[in-house]
Image (spheres, rainbow, N blue to C red):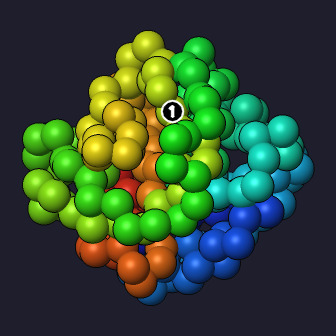
């Protein structure tokens, strides 16, 4: 079986290139594309919606949700998926980047279910999902945020509030490996 090809959509965040690197490090072909790329030009088995500074600057991301491939939103990418599909995002009480211990809710989620029941992550909570869209299960929470991760396995849509691509996050590589498995 050949390895999937995964595209990282650049939403102008500071960690986009680290996300691409993390995927290459797990052995998959990866390309970083600007968020204004025509969806017809995207040839991928999966898409990562990167973090970024503003939900108002996500270009054509809404069109990428319709490409019939798994989509994984990281930080702003998670928040975009939530708002685009009818959930709600609000300013967080804690803001800035910090270590956050997330609680994984069960082991059946294909993206985060393999992580330790409590996993240390690096996250920003300037904004956060406060109400996931219909069809999504909350797959991780914390004392800081009620929706640290969410999944809709029927539509292959996933997201995390934290940054699995940074070294401060425990088992971040495993999250990317799990997404690669989803894309297979």
- The answer to whether residue 25 is left or right of residue 170 is right
Q: Where on the picture, by quarter, is residue 51?
A: bottom right
Q: In terms of depth relative to the viewer, which is nearer, 51 or 158?
A: 51
Q: Return the residue at label 1.
A: 129
Q: Position of residue 90 (x, y in %)?
A: 60, 30
Q: Quadrant of residue 117?
A: bottom left
The reply, left or right, for residue 59 in relation to residue 13 is right
Mark 1: which secondary structure? strand
Is residue 3 in view? yes
Q: Pick out the residue farthest to the front.
A: 93
User: 155 above or below 167?
Assistant: above
Q: Quadrant of residue 105?
A: top left
The residue positioned 46% from the left and 21% from the top of the image is: 131
Nearer to me, 109 or 171: 171
Residue 41 visible to an observer of this rendering:
no
- Pick the residue in front: 68 or 71: 71
45 sits to left or right of 110: right
């Amino acid at each position: 079986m050949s390895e999937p090809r995964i595209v990282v959509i650049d939403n102008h965040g500071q960690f986009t290139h680290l996300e691409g690197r993390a995927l290459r490090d797990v052995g998959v072909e990866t390309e970083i594309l600007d968020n204004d790329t025509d969806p017809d030009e995207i040839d991928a088995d999966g898409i990562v919606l990167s973090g970024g500074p503003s939900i108002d600057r996500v270009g054509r991301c809404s069109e990428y949700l319709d490409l019939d491939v798994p989509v994984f939103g990281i930080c702003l990418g998670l928040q975009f998926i939530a708002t685009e599909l009818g959930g709600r995002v609000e300013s967080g009480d804690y803001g800035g980047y910090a270590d956050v211990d997330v609680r994984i809710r069960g082991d059946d989620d294909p993206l985060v279910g393999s992580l330790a029941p409590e996993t240390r992550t690096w996250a920003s909570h300037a904004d956060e999902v406060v109400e996931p869209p219909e069809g999504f299960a909350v797959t991780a929470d914390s004392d800081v945020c009620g929706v640290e991760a969410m999944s809709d396995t029927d539509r292959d849509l996933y997201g995390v509030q934290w940054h699995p691509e940074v070294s401060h996050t425990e088992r971040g590589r495993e999250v990317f490996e799990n997404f690669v498995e989803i894309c297979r």
